[in-house]
Every structure is written in structure tokens, then in C-alpha cells.
Image (cartoon, grey):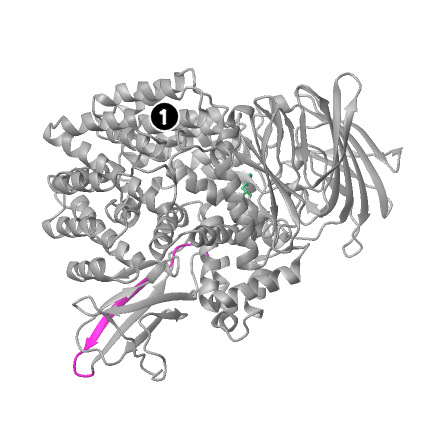
Amino acid sequence: MQLRDAQPVAVRREDYAAPAWWIDTVDLTFDLDPAKTRVLNRMRMRRNMDVPAQPLRLDGGELNLARVLVDGQGASFRMEGDQLVIDTLPDNFELELFTTCCPSKNTKLMGLFVSEDTFFTQCEAEGFRRITYFLDRPDVMASYQVTLRANKSLYPVLLSNGNLVDHGDLPEGRHFAKWVDPFKKPSYLFALVAGKLVAREQRIKARNGKEHLLQVYVRAGDLDKTEHAMNSLIHSVAWDEARFGLPLDLDRFMIVATSDFNAGAMENKGLNIFNTKYVLANQATATDADYSNIESVVGHEYFHNWSGDRVTCRDWFQLSLKEGLTVFRDQEFSQDLCADASARAVKRIEDVRVLRTAQFPEDAGPMAHPVRPDSYIEISNFYTVTIYEKGAEVVRMMQTLVGRKGFEKGITLYFERHDGDAVTCDDFAQAIADANPESELAALLPQFKRWYSQAGTPRVTARGRYDAAARTYTLDFSQSCPPTPGQAVKEPFVIPISLGLLAQDGRELPLHLQGDEDASTAQSHTMVLTQAHESITFNNIDSQPVPSILRGFSAPVVLDFDYTDGELLILLANDPDPFNRWEAGQRLAMRRALAAITGPAADAAGLDEAYINAMRGVLRDPKLDSAFKELVLTLPSETYISEQLDVVDPQRVHAVHEAMRAQLATALFSDWEWAYEQNQDTGAYSPDPLSSGRRALSGLALDNLCLAARASGDTVWPGKTLQRFKDAGNMTDRFNALYALVSSSHPLAQQALARFHALFKDEALVIDKWFSLQAGAPDRGGDVLPLVKQLMKHPDFSLKNPNRARSVIFSYCSANPGAFHRADAAGYVWWSDRVIELDPINPQVAARLARALDRWSKLAEPYRSAAREAIARVAARPDLSKDTQEVVSRALA
Ligand code: PHE
Ligand code: ZN
């Protein structure tokens, strides 16, 4: 009988205890060899006198241990699972460990691994223990020196954190490089790279006159795709200095790209390692979206140099301390690079769209957890949209409560207080509040911190009351938050609500707050909700106004207000807050989608003249930017629509969504033609917001024109689209044309897909797009699953490469609900097979995929039972990784 491992144990936040030992210095020597890498680790260690004496327990994973010396003498030790335990030790000693590992077999991509003949490491969160035995926890910070030795012709470039202090040749065609990191760091920030790489280099001078060397390392053929990443890095350095006074603290800052990576990128001190997807771009191979993601991710990793590396997390429950803050910083960075308010608003809308389509479902599902979780089984499962994106919203609310200048003061105080330390989310919030003692944040801090401790998306209900006799308008607010796993009852949150009032003719009204007569008559006001129920009243209101509530999405909540269509049309046409203008359009579309979904089965399409005319008005509005129009004219996604329903029939949602798309395409046919022609750029390619907005809108127009052609039988636009696909001068236009043919299932799509593959067969990132587009294509009669099965047999497919696996499997299971949720359950069965197949290869990727059925319990029958059965099938497997096991067991709980 096969024995199953004991249930993995949960780590609990309340059990945190300081380490019993400190590591002051680490001296690592690597003899790099793909099959057997030798690692010599010499550490100076000392007992932590502040805690009761305990044995030394070092973490390890898949290591071969050859030698353990304490102060140069053989020492007695024992193994407990993956831990190396030494019972008797002096208070200060040198520990020498000699281990080997096998990077070429490391398909988990954690620790030391090989990608395309190059060595890379990934240590966050718990990968360093797969390189050597260590106190692999973020509150143990040490000084590192690292010597790398390898064959010189196979591995000419040898990199690690910090500064290169020595290098030279060794016998037998080998060489070495020695690196010293001037900053103490936790093990998760360690990195090394060795291989055949080339670098784009740039010397920059900081404000204080100090010189720095910036390098972007890639494989030889990719150098022409590094200019944008380098420019993004230069902008990041300048921005952090200008906005927060945080300078680059290293002589040399390196970015290295690898095509095998579980995540987007990693902020190792001075040696960031990136997924190629977030480095490589030229106009022929990358879309505008790729350019903009590269800018954000380069910024994000660079900003971690302070928010993460200089000040790190005490324990992994504090992950949002660095991630929420750093996402906030990269979002602000991207906004600050925008030339105008409209482009800033577009970026904000895009960020909110991610939050609402990915984080809100997470917060309502079985994996819901607070921004600062209370427990985990596998920390890798907690690199989530809640920690990242909701965490960023929590930081943004702090900025709203203390003001932009106050927030900058808070950041300065935070880094003054905690530089070089491993701290908690409480320390962060305290610093922002202490720098702003008169602020509402300081007054409400304990309550505000419920954003860290309570999971779930709060729901704010607002109702308006106009009193004509008194000429007052009152908004009554109430807030509540649904239960989440382990948290049945929630206390009220601190919710900043930015709002304004519009007259029926669309004019913005001055705000006279009752009870605050001297308050200025501003046109926008931020009300801070703290109670379950409260009200605000405005004076001198001559007629029933239209409230614009939650401007700029000032808090991560669901806002319920019983707007009439007429009021939403007024907001859509007039709200000076572009976010709420967009939101009004989304509400109009959502209302129609929900009515069609829950109405009689025959009326799938629910778009009326009023809605169509409003969309035409936006599309034709000469005062609006193309990027903004593209957002307004894009319907809410099937995922977001499904979240509004208690019971989801995914095929019904899909049918209605498709019908609405077709209706919008047909009803606005001549407007789409006009928009397409209006948004052609002739000049040189540039990924700036204005021109990428024009490309986005012309792409949406093309998509609609092909959809309309599908209904009418027109052949002109599909033909033009194919021509556009062939002639396009950049990947954005080319891909948009291909997308339009594929998403309208036009016969010409096959020809275009074949040509696309032939053109880009050597560009892995473009081939990922080719796979992903097909696996994500709209289902016509159940044809996508068979296609996806075919794609997995394509010679270019590989399960071991995360980008490629995601491009097929995730595009189908997580991004194509209409194709995935099949009444015959074949999509779910296929999903469970893929989770089971991936799990032993790469548990992190498998566990991510396992989350595709997070929302199973909301599905209508027969989907619900079939989905549950598929999850149970995965859960029943012996030897599941704890990553995947945690996800499926929570789903079934
Ligand atoms: N810390 C990385 C980031 O957000 C993400 C990451 C996590 C990368 C875990 C690899 C492994 O910037
Ligand atoms: Zn990060």
C-alpha cells in the first residue's frame, strides 16, 4: 500500500517567533555544472540571545549533503525531513556546508536551474534552501560574497548580486568571478546567472552626480529588443528619485532575461531576473500592451530596490508590505509618465478592471484571504491579486487620506525608520500615520487596518433623497462585507468615497456641505465612511441632482446605487471624472447583460437604441481620446458579468455576451468604419499612450467590422483585414487584424494564422501569442477543446516552459469561459488531467491552473456537479504537491 504523506501543516501568523540564530556573513563558492553543481557555503553564525536557546534547524530541499564542519571540525547533525539539525553549538561559530544539486533536472524553476544552457536562480519565497542549507526566512539578513566558477567558453558571463571584485582564468578552460554585495539581504534576494549573454549598457548620472552602470542582459539574438526595457529602467531611476527622493544605491544595476520563469520578474538585489516577456520588445514582435507591461514591470522590480530590498518583510504574512506598496508605486509611475489627465485616467481604468475581474472573484471565492493572511500551507499560493492589487489599493487609500504630499512624507519616514530592517504592515501604516499626525488616517488607524485583516470585498449601498422644500440632497450610505472562509462577521471599514454632484443638464454643482458651512464650495469631496450607516447632506440644491460616487475608484468596494438609465446617460456624457464616465457606460451595459441573461431564453441580445446612441456619441465625440473611447466601447467581460450573478450559467452568459457584441458591431457599422479610418497613424511607430490608444480603437473597430461581416455575409472587411494583417508595420496592428479574423471565425483566419506562424517561428514570445489566440478563440459549437488538444501536440508546444504552457492551457481554462464550461464536462476533465500532469513538473504552475475552477460553487447545473467532480478527482491523487493540494482542498472545503 502506498502511504500518503501526512497532511501538510499550516504556518500561522500568530506563531511568528524571532530566529534562534543569526547569520552574519555568507561566503558561497559555486562550481557550476548542469548535472552536478557543487556549492560550498561558509557562514558566520551567532546565537540570538533574545530568545530561548534552541537547536539550529537549517532548511533544505532536494540537496545532496557531503560535509558539515563547525569551526573546521566534523560536527554531529541529524536530518528531520528536509531540515538539517545541529543540537550542540557554541554561541558563535563558522559553519561550513558542502552540497551538490542538479540544475538541469530542476523543472520546478525554484533554486538553481538551467534555461537554454544558462544558469539562473529563483529564490523567492523559499528557493534558496534548494541551493544550500540555510535559515531561509526573510528576517535573517546577511552579507554575501559569492565566487562563481565555470567553463569559460560555455559560461562566459558570471553574475551575482552587488559588485564584481575579482575575476580571472582557472586551469582546464575554466574561469571565475567574485561578487560582493554591499547590502545585507535575506536569502530570497540572492541571485546568480551564468551563461552566454550579451548586454545593452547605459551609464547614467544621478541627481547627486553619482555614476551608475545599467545593464540589460539577453541572448545574443535579442539585443535589438532591449531598448525599451533600458529606457524604462532609466525612467524608473529618475522617477523614484524625483517623486520619493529614493536614489539608486548601487554602482551597477543589472536586468537579465530568461524564457523559463514561473513569474513575471524578480527583484534580487542589483540583479533582477525577468521573464523574457517583460523585457524583450521591438515593434515587429511586441504589441503596445507588451510595451506598457514592460514599463510597469521594469519599474516594479526597480522600485523594489527600496520597497522590498532596503526594507523587507519580517515574515511572508507581510508580503503585501512590499508587493502592495510596490504595485502602488509602479502604477503611480506609469501614470506619471502619461502626458495628460486622459491618459492617466485610462491607466487607472485599466488597473481597476484588473482588480474587479481578478481580485473581486478571488475575494469572493474559496481562496479569499486578507491582504495580510493569517495562515498558509504553501506561501507560493499567496502571490495573489489580493496581496498585489488589493494591497496597492490599500496603500492608495492611505495616500487619499493623508494627501499626496503627506504620503511622500510618510514614505520618507518609513525608510528613515526601517532602512535595513525586516518589518511588518503595521510598521508601514504607522509610519504613514505618524508623518501625518493631523490626518484622518492617524485618527482612524486601528480601524483603517481592518483592510489588512479582513478579507472580502465590502459593498457600499448609497441612496439619494432630494428635499425640494429644503433645497437639500442627502446621500445615505451603508456598508457591509460578505463572510469569507474563517471570517463570518466583519467590522466596518474606513472607506474614502470621492464624490460630486451633477445637475440634470450635466453641469457640475458646487458642494455646500451641511454642518460644514465654511467648507469651500469645491466640486469634488472625499467623504470617509467609518460606520455601518451614515449620511451626508448638501445644501442649496435647486433640483434633483445626479450623484457621481466613488470617483477615480477611491476604494476597492462594490458600489450599489439605484441609478436610472437617464442618470447614467448624464454621467456618461458629462462627468468630469473620467473614471465614473467610463463606469456609467459599464453600468448601462451590465444592466442590459443581466436583464438578457436572466430574461426569457429567446432574447439573447439586449441592446436598445438609447444605449447604442450613447455609444455612438462617445465614439464620435471629438473631445475624447481614442484610448478612452476604446475602454468605453468594450463591453464588460464574461467573468465580470458572472460575478454579478448568484448562479452562473456560463453558456448563457457567453451567448448573451456574443449577441451583444454582434449587435454593437452591426448597429454601429458605419461608425466603426469611420473610427477605423480616423485612427490610422502614418508616422513612425511609437508606443506612447496617444498613438497606442489610436491603434487600440482601430483594432476594436476592425474586430467589430469583422463581426458585423460575419452576420451580414460582407466580404469586404475580412478581405481588408487580411490585407492589413499582411501589410502592418508593427505587431499591434498585425495582431489586432489577426485577432479580428480569429474572433469572427472567418475562414481567412486559417491562412493568416499559418502565415503568422511562418513569419515568427523563431520568436518564442510571438509563438506564445499564436497559441494563446487560438486557445482563447470564441467557441463555435464546441470546436475549441479539440483544437487545444491538437495544439498540445504541436512540435512547438512544451509543458515544461511556463509561458508556453500558459499560452495554451491557461488561455483555454482561465480566459475562455464559453469554450471551457462545456455541458458535457469535457473541459473540466481535460483541466484535471493537465493539473495532474503539470503538478510533478512544476507545482507552482499547476497550483495556478488549479485555481481555474475557484468559482465552481456558483455554477448552475450540470456545470456545478461536473466541476466539483473534476476538482475531487485532482484532490484524490496521491503525492500531490502541497501547492496544488492547498488549492483543491480549499476549493472543496
Ligand atoms: N517578487 C516578485 C515581484 O513581484 C514576484 C515573484 C514572486 C517572482 C515569487 C518569483 C517568485 O516582483
Ligand atoms: Zn513585486
Q: Secondary structure at mark 1?
A: helix
Which residue occupies the foreground of this view, 156 or 347?
156
Q: Is residue 374 visible?
A: no
Residue at 43 percent of width and 30 percent of height: 806
Horizontal arrangement in the rendering, residue 752 relative to residue 213 (left or right): left
Position of residue 439 measured from the top left corner of the image (x, y, whole percent): 50, 73
Check disc 1 and give the amino acid type. Trp
**Residue 358 located within the stretch drawn in magenta:** no
In-front residue for pair 161/371: 161
* Residue 364 in picture, x, y percent from top left: 38, 49
Q: How far across and down, in percent of the image, does residue 592 sit?
A: 18, 49
Question: Is residue 459 on the magenta stretch?
Answer: yes
Q: Which residue is mark 1?
A: 770
Q: Quadrant of residue 161?
A: top right
- Which residue sits furthest front? 683
Residue 470 position, x and y percent, is: 20, 83
Q: Quadrant of the N terminus?
A: top right
Q: Does residue 86 show up? A: yes
Position of 497 with respect to 377 (left or right) is: left
Looking at this view, is 580 or 652 the one in front?
A: 580
Q: Residue at x 57, y 55 (%)?
A: 241
Picture layout, residue 653 above or below residue 874: below
477 w.r.t. 892: above or below: below
Q: Is residue 624 left or right of residue 78?
A: left
Picture quarter with ligand 1: top right
Q: Which stretch is magenta?
A: 454-470
- In the image: residue 473, left or right of residue 448: left
Q: Residue at x 23, y 50 (%)?
A: 590
Using the image as rendered, state which of residue 866 and residue 474 is in the foreground. 474
- Figure quadrant of the C terminus: top left
The residue positioned 75% from the left and 27% from the top of the image is 176
